[in-house]
Image (cartoon, rainbow, N blue to C red):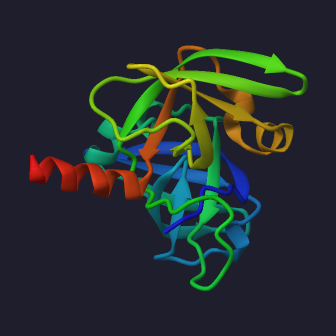
Amino acid sequence: MFTGIIESVGVLEETRLDGNNRVLIINSAIAADLKVDQSLSHNGVCLTVTSLIGADRYQVVAVPETLQRTNLGALSLGDLINLERSMVLGGRLDGHLVQGHVDQTVTCESIREVNGSWEFVFEFGGKHPIIEKGSVCLNGVSLTCYNLTENTFQVSVIPYTYENTNFKSIKPGNLVNLEFDMIGKYLAAILNLRS
């Protein structure tokens, strides 16, 4: 479990295919504190650390299901990746409950700077459990959505989040990982069972 509060931004330094899996080598300031078998959120995707490489690099593996549902398969060398270690039970929950299980990708439709903050509009398709002023997790960042339409929603990103995550590198047309609010997903599933 995660909270959607990004700890660090890593850089994709190396990638290779291992069968149908994609191996990612990431450089990060938190690498020295990691251990093998640890869960770590990468752009909102929960992946297991499989190897430590020196004091500042580590390796994870993304399987085909992950590559199909997320933007990890589209990453290029040098791309920034939002990182968060799993939450500690009994610690503060500053964002919202995030599983690290991406539901789909969404497309950045537009970005507008407003008095030092940034408004992002994202386009998505299909049924969804998003509500006005509800929580969403985008590339691992816990945000509140608003101006919800049938296929778009908007979020505001404060300067600190913009500068300390990969939101500063998102451009219109880019794919971003979306995890719906976990409670909303369960409620939607229960209501579907009753109908």
Q: Is residue 73 above or below residue 106?
A: below
The residue located at (72%, 72%) in the rendering is 32
- Report x, y in % for residue 137: 53, 46
In the displayed orientation, state which residue is furthest to the front: 195
Q: Is residue 38 above or below residue 70?
A: below
Give left or right: position of 103 versus 109. Answer: left
Q: Is residue 56 above or below residue 195?
A: below
Q: Nearer the viewer, residue 98 or 52?
A: 98
Count of labels shown?
0
**Which of the 4 quarters of the picture holds residue 13?**
top right
- Report x, y in % for residue 97: 51, 63
The residue located at (42%, 38%) in the rendering is 130
Give left or right: position of 140 versus 17. Answer: right
- Report x, y in % for residue 53: 62, 66
Give left or right: position of 58 versus 48. Answer: right
**Which of the 4 quarters of the picture holds residue 87?**
bottom right
The residue located at (55%, 31%) in the rendering is 76
Work out whether residue 81 can be spotted.
yes
- Report x, y in % for residue 156: 70, 32
Work out whether residue 12 can be spotted.
no
**Which of the 4 quarters of the picture holds residue 69?**
top left
In the displayed orientation, state which residue is furthest to the right: 115
The residue located at (56%, 24%) in the rendering is 147
Q: Is residue 182 above or below residue 127?
A: below
